[in-house]
Image (spheres, rainbow, N blue to C red):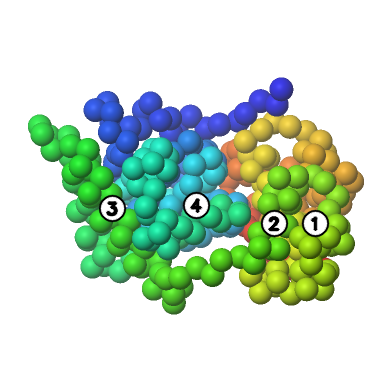
């Protein structure tokens, strides 16, 4: 069985307060960097001081006061180049979102995007100073353990206000609060590829299974997802590879073959075109927490999903 390489910094038993409530908030000063890790709950990281990089499968992003990142369960992330960085974390148990707060999908486009995304990645938001002060107040209320202060209703109420402020900023940044649903042929093809990313999918096979013509399926994918089907498959495989490189010790060639890239050289080529690093360098970077490499190639990006899909079909 493949061993899982999980960083022990965040463990649910240590994160949530002993009072048993499914929400906890706490401040952390991050010096230097934090190596790649994941966890089985939602994390909302809010920067209140300093600067650094937030690193995940979609790239390296500068963070500063007001930067908020929602990290879904089981998605790795890391921090680098931290300078006097203070993060006010909010941890939320998934069953709270899935059960008690299941209505959020209909009310908050931000949460709908997280729950329905076919490629779940961190959501990034930049708050203005006014909203930053508002959410800090909610976080302090969620972390208040003085006698009688942390009732379930109060804590969930503060969490809802926090999420509403984040949603407002997230929606404004995207110019709309509405999500256009995927065409059934697109969602069907996406599900097939997600269920079996290692299968040698062809455009003809996807079109036939989706009961549509090949060129029409390409147009639908371009309209709904911005990329053609096979390019989407390559993206899906690359992101799955990035996750497995961090979370497991599986040999790289074996990992690539499991995802449909039987040729190790081609796997390395596809991965590097997506992330700017070879699979072995990417694994080393994530495990050690390094955030840049010295390379003879001056234009080599340090990391992140940088897909050049224009030439793919």
Which residue in the structure is indicated by mark 2?
188
Number of marks in the image?
A: 4
Residue denoted by label 1? 209
Q: Nearer the viewer, mark 4 or mark 2?
A: 2
Say if mark 4 contacts mark 2, CB within 8 Å. no
Give percent across and percent down for residue 197: 75, 47
Q: Is residue 150 shown above or below 3?
A: below
Residue placed at 56% from the left, 56% from the top?
117
> Can I make out residue 91 in this image?
no
The answer to which of 45 and 154 lies nearer the viewer is: 154
Q: Closer to the camera, 297 or 234?
A: 234
Q: Which mark is residue 160?
A: 3
Q: Nearer the viewer, residue 44 or 105?
A: 105
Taking the view exactly as shown, the residue that stands out farthest to the left is: 147
* Farthest-out residue, bottom: 175
Q: Quick one: label 1 or label 2, which is nearer the N terminus? A: 2
Disc with the residue nearer the chain's start (1 vs 3)? 3
Q: Nearer the viewer, residue 269 or 226?
A: 226
Percent position of residue 192, x then y: 73, 50
Check disc 4 and report the residue beneath it.
Answer: 115
């Amino acid at each position: 069985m493949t061993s899982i390489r999980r960083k022990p910094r965040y463990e649910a038993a240590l994160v949530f307060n002993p009072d048993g409530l499914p929400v906890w908030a706490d401040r952390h000063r991050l010096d230097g960097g934090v190596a790649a890790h994941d966890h089985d709950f939602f994390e909302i990281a809010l920067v209140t001081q300093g600067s650094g990089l937030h690193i995940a499968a979609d790239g390296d992003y500068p963070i500063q006061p007001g930067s908020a990142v929602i990290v879904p369960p089981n998605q790795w992330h890391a921090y680098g180049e931290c300078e006097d960085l203070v993060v006010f974390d909010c941890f939320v148990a998934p069953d709270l979102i899935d059960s008690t707060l299941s209505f959020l999908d209909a009310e908050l486009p931000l949460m709908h995007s997280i729950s329905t995304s076919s490629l779940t990645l961190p959501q990034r938001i930049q708050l203005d100073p006014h909203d930053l002060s508002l959410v800090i107040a909610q976080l302090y209320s969620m972390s208040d353990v003085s006698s009688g202060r942390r009732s379930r209703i109060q804590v969930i109420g503060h969490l809802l206000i926090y999420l509403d402020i984040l949603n407002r900023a997230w929606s404004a940044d995207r110019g709309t609060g509405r999500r256009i649903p995927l065409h059934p042929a697109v969602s069907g093809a996406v599900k097939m590829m997600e269920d079996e990313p290692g299968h040698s999918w062809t455009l003809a096979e996807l079109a036939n299974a989706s009961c549509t013509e090949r060129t029409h399926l390409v147009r639908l994918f371009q309209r709904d997802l911005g990329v053609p089907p096979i390019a989407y498959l390559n993206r899906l495989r690359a992101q799955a590879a990035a996750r497995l490189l961090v979370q497991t010790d599986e040999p790289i060639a074996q990992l690539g073959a499991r995802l449909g890239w039987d040729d190790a050289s081609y796997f390395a080529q596809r991965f590097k075109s997506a992330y700017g690093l070879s699979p072995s360098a990417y694994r080393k970077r994530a495990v050690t927490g390094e955030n840049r490499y010295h390379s003879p190639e001056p234009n080599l990006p340090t990391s992140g999903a940088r897909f050049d899909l224009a030439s793919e079909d």
